[in-house]
Amino acid sequence: MVRQGGPAAGAARGGGEDGRGDGGNGGVVRRSQMKQSSAFIPTLKDSPADAEVASHRLLVRAGFMRRVASGIYELLPLGARVVRNIERIVREEMNAAGAQEVILPIMQPRELWEESGRWSKYGPEMMRLKDRADRDFGLGPTHEEVITDLVRSNVSSWRDLPLNLYQIGDKFRDEMRPRFGLLRGREFIMKDGYSFDRDEEGMRRSYQAMYDAYGRIFTRSGCTWRAVEADTGLIGGDVSHEFMVPAAVGEDDIAYCEGCDYAANVTLATFKRAEPLRGEGKAAEKVHTPEKRTIEEVSSFLGLGPDRFIKCLMFLVEDKPVAVLVPGDREANETKLERVLGTDEFRLFIEDDWKRFPSYLQGFVGPVGLQAAEVIADVALAGAGGMVCGANEEDYHLAGVDEGRDFTAGRFEDITSAREGDVCPRCSGTLRIEAGIEVGQVFQLGLKYSEPMRCYYDDEDGVSRPMVMGTYGIGVTRLMSAIIEQHHDERGMLWPLAVAPALLHILPLNYEREERRSAARELYERCQERGWEVLLDDREESAGVKFADADLIGIPYRAVVGKGYDEDGTIELQVRTTGEKNKMDMDSLMGLLQQAVDTLADERPHVS
RNA sequence: CGGGGUGUAGCGCAGCUUGGUUAGCGCGCAUGCUUUGGGAGCAUGAGGUCGGCGGUUCAAAUCCGCCCACCCCGACCA
């Protein structure tokens, strides 16, 4: 995608700390083309056939991006501008939080990844290639190895810590399934940061600083968001939070409490179990259930609710069969299972496994009298009675089964997913589930990389200790898409001011009319003098075309120079999000815009 | 990597079942005139290896085989 731009590409609205605007710098920086007649903004009337979700569809239709291969996109001028605006917010907040920007390579040598053990662990998602001398390289899906190598060879004293470095650049991950445009691309722009501290406490401070900065970044970007407890996955580490932007198209489900601030990815959200069901104390009896294999089938056949059943799932774990028991109305959660099992080398039985272990009868497995390497049950089943489960005999189930009397499990663990309406583990409030897009994640890594990669420092007492690390990511291009998912209507995008491709869209209708044309130009120039980004629609198109394109592009403010201007010299200021329209003269319009710009500037961190 | 689907002009699609002359439509594009507060009208025009390769046939966008690309549904990632 787009590489780092120089200052010319930067989008400074709201006060020229970064040397923008024409004042003072002799105009050496030429502003990019903002007249629509010559700007590269290829809008489309029809949605591209391959776009499923709003953000993908609109980004293509409005001329912000194009696809070049599956999961790989080009950002056109408007798209590039939004990305640069997001990056600017990220930079401001990262710098204010004490992080320093670096630029790291995307090509990374195999040796570095061997040191951390991830060359073999990362799998096909890391794109691998060889150079002309047949040396192995990977395209960086993330940069822990490179940064750790950099720091270990250049930092050796406690006096240099803490250190927090970040970069904004391209990542490549050969996703098994790229989809939804920039929401899950293979090549994407990410801000990734890494902190190095002397001890745990320092790491927690760095982590908190990043956590807080992330909140500010997403708020300033115009998103509503939620931070949730998260799994640490391939990156590793102990504590982690994901920053989620609620959206229907989100690929993650998050559980949050209505009553308190508990929130977690459902992959690890926990919940209070209800009291287990009780039986009547009668002995278990065999019931004939011909050809009834699934919970639904047996449940409707016997007229018993699925919560009365014990679902017995067979997993192959490190090549050994393991029985996993969950209540019939619940799903086993593979992420939780991975933690419990302590390995990621497991899978639900497939056809071959059933053949290989013929003593397990598919559809009729049950915990009573079962020969398995291990039996793991969800905690909800401890003490449950009067349950129904497979009888380990073709076409038979057992009813009236009591845990403790008829069977037990080797371990009772939290292995099922929370769902809507479950009880909060902290406050006993009600849990809700919502879909979200993961736009950022922060990890407390600890010694995960510093230990194996020998990233040590000499402490005050002369002892050599491993640095305690944290790692922090934001999907910049994904964030752009997430913003659109939260801000669009049937006609187009509705950009929050802080990231919008421009502040103002000037629409002179009947552009060939000299008075309107010169008024529009005057407004355009006055805006440019203040360093604002504006787009002037100087095309000789009909009003309908201009309005439709403007709606699609979604610039927050629109100045229509039309009839009103002929009548009494007024320009109509329209607000894209609200549809609000007000006629005013050019000076008042400039005043209003200045207010909007000032408000935006107030959100920026104050540099000390 | 499994399952399903699609590839025909820049974009969106029809044609394919039942092979048959110059392969169509809408949008967009070019030129001219008339238009211009919500995707204008008329006229003229340009633009296609029908995803690729091979096969069947007198004849293939159409039938067969292989390959490629892309999209959708499932295995935890910014």
Image (cartoon, coloured by chain):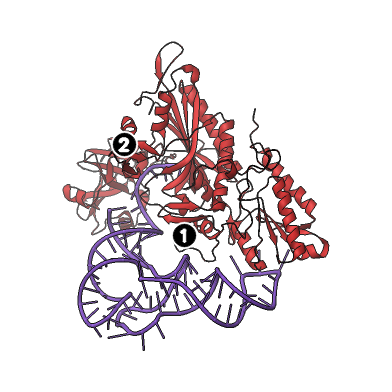
Q: Is residue B19 above or below residue A377?
A: below
Circle 1 marks a residue in which chain? Answer: A
Q: Is residue A206 above or below residue A248?
A: above
Q: Nearer the viewer, residue A547 or A419?
A: A547
Residue A490: mark in rendering: none
Q: Nearer the viewer, residue A531 or A583?
A: A531
Say which element carries label 1. loop
Q: Nearer the viewer, residue A337 or A303?
A: A337
Residue at the spot of label 1: A51
Q: Residue furthest top?
A: A461
Question: Residue sitting at 59 percent across and 38 percent down?
Answer: A216
Residue A266 visible in this rendered orientation of the protein: no
Question: Residue sitting at 54 percent across and 64 percent down?
Answer: A44
Residue at the spot of label 2: A119
Left or right, A607 with reference to A432? right
Left or right, A275 with reference to A557? left
Chain in red colour: A
Sequence order check, earlier mark of 2 and 1: 1
> Would you identify the image quadrant in which residue A24 lies?
top right
The image shows residue A463 at horizontal and vertical percentages of 40, 13
State the separation of the CA atoms marked 2 and 1: 34 Å
Look at label 1 and name its amino acid: Ala
Look at label 2 and name its amino acid: Trp
Q: Residues within 10 Å of mark 1 (few under 14, many from 20)?
A: some
Chain in purple colour: B
